Amino acid sequence: MAVFSLKKIEKKKINNIHHYNLRYTKSQSFTMSINVLCLHGCNQTEEAFKGYLKGLTQLAKKYDINFHFCEAKYDHPDLGKTWYNKPLFVKDIGTIEYDEDLVGYTLENINQLIGKLDISCLLGFSQGSNVVDTYLGYTNDTRIKCAVMLSGYYLVDSNRKVSDVPILNVISKDDDVVKYELAPKDYKSIEVLDHNKGHKIPTSKPQLREILAFIRKHH
């Protein structure tokens, strides 16, 4: 029996995508730490992703936000790791259908890490964002208060549920790997941060602060 089963509900039309600008206040103090679980992209590794997020994790100290990294289990034939038990390829993004057998082990692993590390926010890049989106779409995990998806995309399934978890889609219209139109959409609350770096993580401090401010405001 699969760990995660899909509850069939009526698909709702969501039209509440907002662009926003959050201001950073140096004097602000916080009463609790936040733990974020970070999922790397396909063909990457945990260590590589730590390097890509170095700018964000350094700034996060001022927000009392802790970043935890994990690595995908499966080797990808083209290099690095992949999150699912068979490799997915760039040319298929946008047409890949949800398959419980494909994602089951990974979702169970994420569930266990959330409990072990006291995680309340998920962050993913590219395929890592797809894992985050899939987890939120097929579970009802009230421990997760928000999620950040960088260059994210979804698996095709007309019956997936709409999630209550607020998300931040970090997208680039210059992304030639994951088209920005494929950003996850089945959420009641979506905010969007645009950047011009293509299929990469934004590096400017104002944009990194916006990501951190989004995480903070939902805790």
Image: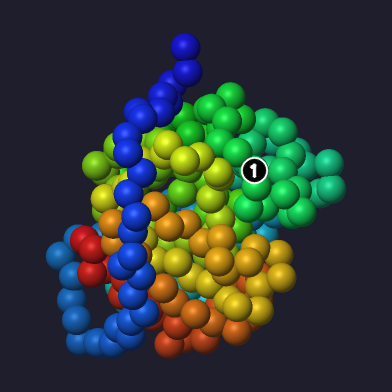
Relative image position of residue 18 (x, y in whole percent): 33, 75
Outermost residue to the left:
31
Circle 1 crowding by C-alpha within 10 Å: few under 14, some 14–19, many from 20: some
Relative image position of residue 205 (x, y in whole percent): 47, 86
Q: Quadrant of the C terminus?
A: bottom left
Task: Name the secondary structure under disc 1.
Answer: loop
Total number of numbered labels? Answer: 1
Relative image position of residue 121 (x, y in whole percent): 35, 54
| Residue 60, above or below 204 | above
Tell me the residue that label 1 is attached to.
96
At horizontal 66% and vertical 79% (from top left) the residue drawn is 174
Whether residue 127 sits left or right of residue 55 in the image: it is right
50 or 189, which is in the foreground? 189
Outermost residue to the top:
1
| Residue 82, above or below 204 | above
Q: Is residue 7 visible?
A: yes
Relative image position of residue 134 (x, y in whole percent): 48, 43
At horizontal 43% and vertical 87% (from top left) the residue drawn is 206
| Residue 208 figure quarter | bottom left
Q: Is residue 113 visible?
A: no
Whether residue 79 sits left or right of residue 97 in the image: it is right
What amino acid does circle 1 point to? Answer: Ile
| Residue 176 figure quarter | bottom right
At horizontal 48% and vertical 61% (from top left) the residue drawn is 149
Whether residue 80 sits left or right of residue 65 in the image: it is right
At horizontal 36% and vertical 44% (from top left) the residue drawn is 11
100 or 9, which is in the foreground? 9
Picture colour scheme: rainbow
